Amino acid sequence: MKTVVALGGDGIGPEVVDAACYVLENMGVDLEIVKPPCGEKALKEYGTPFPKETMELTNSADAVLFGASGEASVIILAYLRWFFDTYANVRPVKYYEGVLTSIKNPEGVDFVIIRENTEDFYPGREGDISLLAERMPDYKDILGRRFADYGEGKFAVGLYTVKGCRRIAEFACKEALKRKRKGFPGKVTCVTKSNVLRETGGLFQRMVEEEVRRHPELTYEHFYVDDMARRIVRFPREMDVIVTTNMFGDILSDLAAELMGGLGMAPSACIGDKHAYFEPVHGSAPDITGKGIANPTATILSCVMMLEYLGMEKDAGKLEKAVAEVYRKGETLTPDMGGTAKTMEVAEAILRELM
Ligand code: NAD
Ligand code: IPM
Ligand code: MN
């Protein structure tokens, strides 16, 4: 039997993870779900948001379900991304009938953002400009200015490695091929800012282009991120597989979530070669924490992705169908979807569809 470790994290994280686990535990899947202490609650009780025993269980799990990080659980998120090296953040954008969205005609929206999850400006590498002035006194930027010319301030460094760009390019192409077999166009859309970031964005773009060329059955396009933000809103049905760098992917995935009903709906998977973890796109939502009104659907759809990853495609399909059915009926909706239902009521409605 496969083991899933469920880590709620902070804010609404434990609320939506509890709701998702309630569905998983009662739908009859062959999974052992373990819920060790973590997050804000563990910080209060044990003085750490990520006790050693929790970390050990996390290490040996077949998959991890994560809720959200606010302040306390950033360390857990960092562990899951950088120590597990989960470099591919898969963020599907799929409209389900009945969902309240921010666009007029959301029917048929079904694409995926593949966000590089380990490089770029993450984890923040920052410091005082004076440090650069001292260490790189001769470096001149495109304007001919040295760091010392800029006075007091801060810098941030973005890193993009050949290995990092290559593996996300490969992942995106595999995803496009997989989707093509299911009837999608088989198109990779690369998003960078290589007009300004010629070296870094240029490397990412080149690596994606090299990889796409190995797959003549795929089509390819590239857009700058500013134009892409507009295109996602204007031409959402033309998208298939979008591949982009970490921070652009972070921003574009919140934007694109609105096409499928917002953050309460948007799931994600963080996949590495040895580990994978699953989390909604949203955060700890301090403004609604403790009210019992968080939409658990994003987390439940993340469980669909988790079941697929674990090779339990049949269960994944059933669970996704149950979610779709609840929205088609439109009787049990949380406030973000225009209803008055509570988090657990949505979980119960989804479970009823599975029975
Ligand atoms: P957020 O995603 O927590 O919330 C943004 C808005 O969306 C809020 O109005 C919130 O109420 C709403 N929302 C989010 N999830 C919802 C749900 N399931 N149902 C209904 N409404 C929902 O983003 P934020 O407010 O910018 O950040 C709050 C904290 O979360 C910060 O500490 C941030 O760093 C963190 N964060 C963590 C993750 C993560 O763990 N992966 C993702 C995003 C933000
Ligand atoms: C996300 C979040 C995180 C990110 C934060 C909490 C570090 O916004 O998962 O989308 O920027 O990746
Ligand atoms: Mn984000």
Image: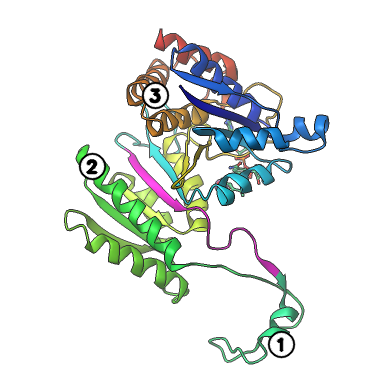
| Residue in front for this viewpoint, 267 or 2 | 2
Question: Disc 1 vs disc 3: which is toward the camera?
Answer: 1
Q: Amino acid at mark 1?
A: Ala
In the depicted view, which residue is nearer to us: 74 or 288? 74
On screen, residue 20 above or below 224: above
Residue at which label 1 appears: 148
Q: Is residue 243 above or below residue 267?
A: below
Dot 1 or dot 3: first in sequence order is: 3
Q: Residue at x 65, y 21 (%)?
A: 292
Numbered badge on residue 98: 3
The residue shown at (38%, 62%) is 166
Q: Quadrant of residue 104?
A: top left
Q: Which residue is mark 2?
A: 184
Q: Amino acid at mark 3?
A: Gly
Label 2 and label 1: CA atoms lie apart by 52 Å
Looking at numbered disc 2 in the image, what kind of residue is underneath it?
Phe
Q: Quadrant of the C terminus?
A: top left
Q: Where are the magenta residues, as a range?
A: 109-126
